[in-house]
Image (cartoon, rainbow, N blue to C red):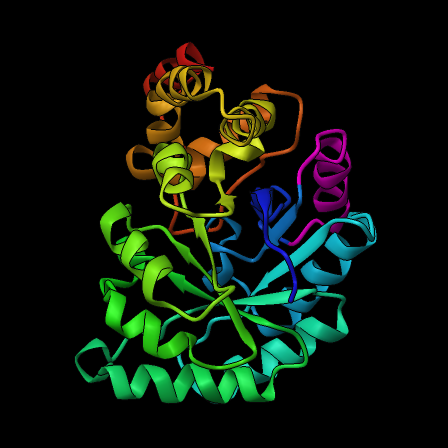
Amino acid sequence: MLQLNGIFPPLPTSFNKDESLSEKHIRNNIEFLNQYSLSGYLILGSNGELVMLSHEEKIRTLHAAREAIPKDKLMIAGTGCESTRETIILSKDAAIAGADTVMVLNPSYYKGQMSQTALVVHYHAVAEASDVPVIIYNMPANTGLDMTAADIIAISDHPNIIGLKDSGGNVAKMADVIFKAKKGFQVLAGSAGFLLPALSIGAVGGILALANIAPQHCLDIYQAFSDGDFNRARNLQQEIISLNAAVTRNWGVPALKSAMDHMGMYGGPCRKPLQPISEDVKKKLLQLL
């Protein structure tokens, strides 16, 4: 089974000033981050503005990223779409583009119809058709639908479904999934804000927005925990709470891209309707960096 241990940044997708796709800046950002001992990258996650891209742009993004990602690092491709059919098509194209695994956000537009049966049928159809392993993605802040532990455990019962990224922050639920899901099922923290608590209940790593701008700090938490240095891990975890909140729930992708610009990487604009952060917010953000 593909091993998901370690820290993965969910790379923002780079756009030029006119909001056209910039493959050059996607590659440059990855090359910058390659100096760190990251396990790989998530391309086309929530921080990658997946829903802002056409199918053709998604494939271009994946090809550009794979060119810069070393073969010993994983490329996780976000392929969740609202229909099972479109998710399968994108997952197959992602595999052709070089993805080692795909991460599938649950459909949510018709959330009232997303029963456990509907979710299981969806994920199992994708897993059956996908040429690479599938990771479940639970992101209730964006979907408005928080899959239960029972939902996730039922979905995980397919040989080609290998793990879960959970961004909900319910560590008790994550522990329940780890305890009850099939042997070898791997759980990843979806935010640096609860990386250490997640590791402490059996998560194997994290897909963390903060790892784009503070990769070594995230790696240090992971390493300190792995070394059994829990005091150091706790202190490191506490140090990043405010910065993590700034680039996630407080100010989101525009703040993350602004922080990348400040650090010498390329953040650039988001696609509308997302707006750049104000100068006042930027000052507050820079105080945290």
Q: Residue at x 26, y 65 (%)?
A: 149
Identify the image quadrant of residue 118: bottom left
Residue 211 is situated, as x and y percent measured from the top left of the image, at 54, 34
**Image side of residue 218 versus residue 235, left or right:** right
Vertical placement of residue 131 versus 273, above or below: below
Q: Is residue 27 magenta?
A: yes
Residue 197 is situated, as x and y percent measured from the top left of the image, at 34, 36
Identify the image quadrant of residue 109: bottom left
Vertical placement of residue 88 versus 277, above or below: below
SS assignment for the magenta stretch, majority: helix
Residue 232 is situated, as x and y percent measured from the top left of the image, at 46, 15
Q: Which residues are magenta?
A: 21-38
**Image side of residue 173 versus residue 202, left or right:** left
Residue 163 appears in view: yes
Q: Residue at x 68, y 59 (%)?
A: 61
Furthest toward the left, the residue is 112
Name the residue nearer the viewer: 177 or 125. 177
Name the residue nearer the viewer: 289 or 9. 9
Name the residue nearer the viewer: 155 or 55. 155
Q: Residue at x 56, y 45 (%)?
A: 12
Name the residue nearer the viewer: 30 or 203. 203
**Image side of residue 14 versus residue 224, left or right:** right
